[in-house]
Amino acid sequence: MRLAIIDSGGANIASLRFAIERLGVASELTTDAQVIRNATHVILPGVGAAADCMGRLERANLVDTILNLQQPFLGICVGMQLLFESSEEGDVDCLGMLPGRVRRFPNRDGLPVPHMGWNNLEIIHPSPLLKDFSEDDYVYYVHSYCAPVGDETLASTNYGENFSAIVQRENVFGVQCHPERSAKSGALLLKNFLSIE
């Protein structure tokens, strides 16, 4: 296995790599297009603003590389949001691998933004990424923006409304939670992703 983690500048990358290392898998943090193309699995993590992350990918000339990946590809948090067509955050065009626009949670009494904390997953469609998951499993979130529920949604979470928690289209996967901070459930998500061929 050759796992490439795209260096998107997120503060969570070290903890993500450590979580993967605990599974017995080495990873390479890179912006080298050739390394990414030659990997068996690719992860795009993201923390911060969608526009900043997209700008980093564009400056590294990685957009076309990402769009042409055939191996399993996983976007995490903002990395998942970048899979969609656009985001309200910075009004930015994203990768367009999935249909829809990412938008900010509306302000609601008793539901502060950002959404921070543990929530369970409502599983909509089975997937190898969700192998051995149940709706009693909780994952950890920190986000102000969310993707709509659509045909590509494998699981949703409710925070005043349902949003896409996990998505998939062919070889492209996304998780809105932080698996590196989601204890046993997060480790299972990463293990399942790395088991996909």
Image: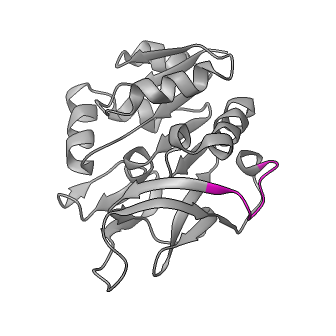
How many numbered badges does the structure rendering display? 0
Foreground: 178 or 4? 178
Q: Name the image quarter holding the N terminus.
A: top right
Foreground: 78 or 13? 13
Residue 152 in view here: no
Q: Is residue 81 above or below residue 16?
A: below
Q: Is residue 178 above or below residue 89?
A: above
- Is residue 49 found left or right of 14 in the rendered image? left
**Where residue 59 sits: x, y (%)?**
20, 29
Kindly identify the residue that appears in the image at 64 percent across and 64 percent down: 121
Kindly identify the residue that appears in the image at 73 percent across and 51 percent down: 130
Report the residue that reaches farthest toward the right. 132
User: Magenta residues?
Assistant: 131-138
Foreground: 50 or 21? 21
Q: Is residue 68 above or below residue 90?
A: above
Report the residue that reaches farthest toward the bottom. 109
Q: Which corner quadrant of the image does residue 124 belong to?
A: bottom right
**Where residue 58 sits: x, y (%)?**
24, 34
Q: Name the image quarter holding the C terminus.
A: top right
Give the main secondary structure of the magenta stretch. Answer: loop
- Is residue 80 found left or right of 135 in the rendered image? left
**Where residue 155 sits: x, y (%)?**
64, 64
**Where residue 126 sits: x, y (%)?**
78, 59
Q: Which corner quadrant of the image does residue 104 belong to?
A: bottom left
